[in-house]
Image (tube, helix red, strand yellow):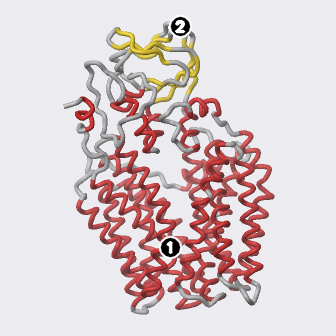
Amino acid sequence: MARREQLQESLGQVWNGPLRRLVAGHFLAAAAEWAVYIGAFVYAFQRGGSAATGVASILLLASTVVASPLGGQLAARLQPNVARLGSLLGQAFGLIVAGVAAIADGPLWIVLAGSVITLSLFRVLRPAQAVLAPLLCEHPRQLSTTNLWIGHADSSAALFGPLLSTALLSVGGPGALLLGFGIALGVAGVLQAVDHKRGVSERKAVAYDASLASVVVEPFRQLRSRGGLLSLVGLITLQYGLVGALDILFVVISLETLGLEATSSSLLTTSFGVGALGAVVLSTWAHKSNRLAMALSGGLVVCAVVIGVLALLLTSPMATITPLFLGLPVLGAARFVVVVVSRALLQRSADDDTIGSVFALQELGSGLGILAGSVVAQLTLFASGPALTLAVFSTVYVAIAGLTWRSVHLAESSATVPLVEMGVLRKVPAFAPLPPVALEAVARQAELVDVEAQDVIVRQGDTGDQFFVVVSGECDVVMDDEYVRTAGRGHSFGEVALLANVARTATVRATNTATLLVIAREAFLRALSSDDTATTQMWRGVAEMDFGNQFIEIPTLDNPAGGARGAGT
């Protein structure tokens, strides 16, 4: 059998059944999260008008804020397969209870109780499957594929969740919507039960620090010492208020102001989500052109203008839903730019040793912002109506843009962007497909190192823990005392030992004075696991190498042809 065929059969399928079921279950759960809000709010409006919808919004959003740290703690204390199975079945139970109660025209509190159970247990799902997925993988490339598809599942759920909700609402109202997703999650739980014994390890339960000091106080102290960072987190928190407001506004505008069918509220949510998909191009341009502060401030201004225009249109006695379908995609695109760019700017500005706690504070702030937005929306709706609510949020966005203009630009100017390192990595075929944020993340972990002529950089047979890219100069690659090739500017080496977890397959010696970009094992593997294309490209380069008598296991590749410049080390 040919060498390539032997290598391709060594690992079999690159994405196994348990992983496919894991991703499918995640998609259903993420879509169900959208359905819970839509179904619960529509039923609340039918039972008690906008006031009841406002109370329901506050209750559901508050439950997610409280459940976030508790969900993480529960996921850390249980085996990951047990935690995930319990999360899916618990979510299904909550939705089925809420759906049956709504179909029977039962009390609102039962529907809300079931919804709270579902949203709270959803907070267990992500941390549990983050631990479970690697245990189900038989090779690192499978983890890369799984991470990629979980991201696709999240994006798809933001669009198809509201679309499916619209269909179920039109068939049988909010009860059918909640019950339908409850049954779907029950099926996902059954599929998880099939793999219940998979992923069981000797992993010991770990303590999860969800104290107020670890989540809020310490990160707050760190942010105060960095120019613009505290204002940036405040900006993120405040703009999330719009999300909390829109959840209730879509229901009130469609059912009360315009007198439309219940399905129209979910169509408005879908329209908002469609705009978010189109903002990918804008956020990518902001990253590549290094104009994050301008994109962030511009996104805030566009949000303010669009919200203000929609408020004016709703004051007209001839108001229709058409302007909303035209304006909401623009609003969704602008807000998506604000979210993505602000998080990227936060990542650039925070120190490596504090970035985890900074983002923990940001996540908590996002939840509080959504809750505050819901409260403000309820109060303004009670006082006047949706037009006033939109006018208030338009004013808030104008204030945010004005008050944070200086601090946002200060944060960008003080950010340590590794432009040189990013430029070098873009020339490596395997790293070229990485999105800007992922490329920047690995570049921040890289280090420029100078070596002298005849210095041995890696030695055949040694343990490998670094990946190298030649920035300047040349290096000779020698295998079994025989010259193989010369690695010049833009060439890389050291990937084989890290990917295949083997000893160095060759010796590399500097031919003359050279500068190398060095990336540690953890950062290298983390970058590849974030993008399936990058992983495939790196393995393709390895598959084209000649290792002499050494055998290296290589996973099955969809298209083994093609190559990357590598030196087999």
Q: Is residue 529 above or below residue 112?
A: above
- Judge the density around disc 2: few (<14), some (14-19), many (≥20) Cα neighbours within 10 Å: some
As helix, strand or loop, the secondary structure at mark 1 comes to: helix
Which residue is denoted by mark 1 in the rendering? 162
Horizontal side of 558 relative to 244 (left or right) equals left
What's the amino acid at mark 2?
Answer: Ala
Q: Is residue 10 above or below residue 29?
A: above
Q: Quadrant of residue 516?
A: top right
**Residue 337 image position (x, y, % from top left):** 65, 56
Quarter of the picture holding the N terminus:
top left
Quarter of the picture holding the C terminus:
top left
As helix, strand or loop, the secondary structure at mark 2 comes to: loop
Q: Quadrant of residue 555?
A: top left
Horizontal side of 293 relative to 25 (left or right) equals right
Q: Which mark is residue 109?
A: none
- Judge the density around disc 1: few (<14), some (14-19), many (≥20) Cα neighbours within 10 Å: many
Q: Name the one closer to the observer, 98 or 117.
A: 98
**Residue 65 image position (x, y, % from top left):** 53, 65
What's the amino acid at mark 1?
Answer: Pro
Residue at 47 percent across and 35 percent down: it is 430
Residue at 78 percent across and 64 percent down: it is 398
- Number of residue marks: 2
Horizontal side of 291 relative to 554 (left or right) equals right
Which residue is denoted by mark 2 in the rendering? 453
N-term mark: 2 or 1: 1
Q: Quadrant of residue 113?
A: bottom left
Cα distance between the residues tagged 2 and 1: 62 Å
